[in-house]
Amino acid sequence: MSVFDSDVRYLQAYKIPELFDDLMRQLLSERPSQPVSFLGSKLNAASTLSAEEFNAIVGPVANEPLALDLTDAAAWDRVYDTADKLLQTFVTVDRLRAVENALLAKQRELPTMVHLAAKLATSKALLATCPPVFVTMLVALYNEKNRMSTKQEHPNGENFLVNKAREMEWLFEAAPASSWEIVYVDDGCPQGSGKLAEERIKSNGIPNSRVDFLQRAIDEKDPTFADIKDTKDSQKGGAIEFGMWEAAKGDHGDKEHIVIFTDADLAANLSQTGLLVFNLTSSPSRMSCVGSRYDEGGIFCNEKGAMGVTKNFELLAFRDFLKRLLLPALGKGRDTQCGFKAFKASVVKKVIPSVTDRKFSFDMQLLMLVALQCGGQAAMGSEAVVYVDSLAESNFYQQAPGVDPMLESYKSYFNMMGRMLALHDTFKDKQEVPAANQPVIDFVRGLTLEAFSKMMATMPRMQGKPDWGRVFTLPELKGWAA
């Protein structure tokens, strides 16, 4: 697809031709004395909501809890009912974006479910404008017996096998020429999550869903994964990379094949996939797209509701600074760690053989390889999403009793800084890092966990949100760590 065709499709998605025709009819009918001002006021009105429109959206959800219970099947029904009503009422993407923006203005006052419903509606409207695609959604399985259960079977049951298929089915109603599948990859789970998933998929008749096993890569001696001698050599990374590699071998004819990975929980609703697909298919140079909790328009939700980021502002801002300092090839996106990332299958074939990180941190190396081998920052996309935290059965966020959670956060971010430094060293000859950055790089490289923790604890508190884009100076950092 040419750049021109992509731009035209983008305009069509926002119904610009129809909107312009309608405005011209109004202009000729009303014959205002100042035509340009008249058109400007009409265009501005299309991008905002009236008080009546806003109240018609939030009124029906006024009694909803601020938080969204991921285990509550009835709550999910209400989310989709709300999204369907928004699509019926606000029929263009620009109007749906206006809905999102109006809700964001009162973000914390409104239920998580209405924010999510608005994002899902926009996603579905965008997917309807995309060329035919085939989406492979990958999910690693490890100790997921409880979360794949229903709430009646286990208090933390999210019934994710059923719900993820529902999320994809609902979205792809808008794109009948497109197709999808969900592939669950067992990462050597001692609970036998893969076998359990196979049984549930069959017994529940869950569509377009199947299970693969990392053990197969070992048994078949796949040379791309020769370093994995035992499934214990992988912590999520190996399973996702094997799944991506296998998926990219598929032939889907004229459909653009897009490979996405996500987590087993319901934190990132897959009906938001249209956002990522539109981002990728709108640009010939775009090769990956990250769902972001922290970009403008993204919302991080927790047990209190659509709170956004409510703590660790300084850690997030400093991590963002380190990414820009050490890994500038990754571009401007703020969230490299969200479990919702999409890639064109062509780039998967190119970069997966070079990936060596088989642990939880694999995605940052994967993104670096995409950036450096496939066009730099132009290859890197980012789309704001609504993300609902799910910690009860997490394999990553497990808090030991009696341990200070802030100290654990410092440790986690310190380890992440170490991985970023290692990637910087690996790719230092393949990206442009200004020489002026070197003294700060040398300083952070020499930090101990104790000094890092003191630096973060002493750093002045940021008010309201992370100070995104801040440049931390060497004297500041030294002073806080001393």
Image (tube, helix red, strand yellow):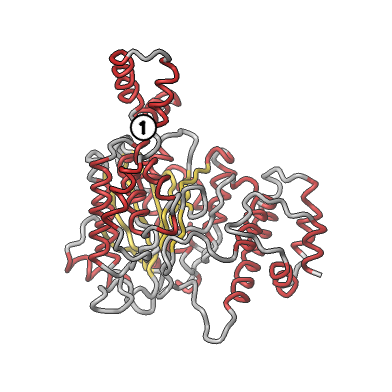
Going 39% across and 31% down the picture, which residue do you hit?
A: 10
Residue 330 visible somewhere in the drawing: yes
Residue 203 position, x and y percent, is 17, 69
Residue 150, placed above or below residue 39? below
Q: Considering depth in this image, is 302 or 232 the residue closer to the camera?
A: 302
Q: Name the residue under label 1.
A: 14
On the rendered structure, is 8 left or right of 365? left
The quadrant in which the C terminus is found is bottom right
Under mark 1, the amino acid is Tyr
Residue 298 position, x and y percent, is 46, 52
Residue 110 position, x and y percent, is 38, 57
Q: Considering depth in this image, is 307 or 226 the residue closer to the camera?
A: 307
Residue 150, placed above or below residue 373? below
Residue 299, placed above or below residue 389? above
Dot 1: within a 10 Å radius of its alpha carbon, few (fewer than 14), some, or many (20 or more) residues?
A: many
Going 35% across and 79% down the picture, which residue do you hit?
A: 191
Residue 33, placed above or below residue 157? above
- Where residue 303 sits, quadrant-wise, is bottom left
Residue that protrudes farthest toward the bottom in the picture: 402
